[in-house]
Image: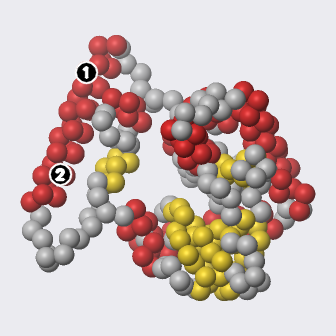
Amino acid sequence: MSSSAVAVTTATMAATPVAMTAAGTATAVATAITAVTATATAIATATAADPPLSQEPRPRTRFFFVPRFFRARLPFPSLAVCSGSLAAFIGGSMTQSGDIVTLGAGQYRLREQLAGSSYGLVWRAEREGFAQVALKLVNRAQMERAEPGLRARWSECAAREIAFLSALSPWDARHIVRLLDHGMADGLPALALELLDGDLAAHMAAQNAAGHRTGLAQALAWTAQVNAALAKVHQQGWRYLDLKPANLLVDLAGASLKLADFGTNRSLLDTGAHSYAGTASWQAPEQF
């Protein structure tokens, strides 16, 4: 079974929010492609025209976004990093390899940034005498760029994840990433999680590149594991709002998947109107 088939089994694909005739669709597609291509050309031209500030080459990061409807028709992905480092965009420069983070059970030395988003940064970290962990920190740089009235959301997401994981019993962690330690780092919540072998999206990409196909039995096992994890989330009184391959972590030793990233959880008792949460490409169409 291909990675696309597994993804469809475990998450709902977003629908294109447009309705038009065939002729109208073709015209809209052609117009959008022309506009986006012109934008990309302008960015490239502007980059080439920028005068150097020094003799040393300086990494530059530029992003442009393309609607999902047009991704298959364009020669570049929906989020293109033209040059430079992703860490420069997500604010990783505020925390550096070698920094010490003190949580409830001890001190952790950061070694390598593994992942990042506008809300959180995940580092490989080590504590003397213990196995390495995945240390999740609030993305302070992005938080400080937000309006003052919105900054509390960063801490709330981390606190929500800690609350959910802390309430689980040891036997609940079979298909949910385990919380090993938590506390406050520079006044913001931080978590030490078990370190696994990457996410399902990266794993499937590596498998496909190596010419290995995922068998039906494995795909069905993964589906059952994800369902078991979601059932546990619901049993604890939460809704999980960001199901996607990037939030399914692979445990190669146990040939299993574990659900991760619970910052967007929402209480089952919260039935009122609320702001959007999740990843657009993996949301059910009725959310839009």
The residue that disc 2 covers is 44
Residue 247 horizontal/vertical position (percent): 63, 51
**Is disc 1 surrounded by few (<14), some (14 to 19) or many (20+) residues within 10 Å?**
few
SS for tag 2?
A: helix
The span from disc 1 to disc 2 (Cα, nearest Å) is 26 Å
Q: Residue at x 83, y 57 (%)?
A: 173
In this picture, residue 124 sits left or right of residue 36: right
Question: Which amino acid lies under the numbered mark 2 shown in the image of this protein?
Answer: Ala
Residue 25 horizontal/vertical position (percent): 33, 20
Q: Nearer the viewer, mark 1 or mark 2?
A: 2
**Is disc 2 surrounded by few (<14), some (14 to 19) or many (20+) residues within 10 Å?**
few
Question: Relative to 120, does residue 260 appear above or below in the rendering?
Answer: above
The residue that disc 1 covers is 27
Q: Residue at x 34, y 54 (%)?
A: 81
Foreground residue among 169 and 250 = 250
Question: Relative to 139, does residue 210 appear above or below in the rendering?
Answer: above
> Is residue 120 in view?
no
In this picture, residue 47 sits left or right of residue 9: left
**Which quarter of the figure is the N terminus placed in?**
top right
Q: Residue at x 59, y 45 (%)?
A: 203
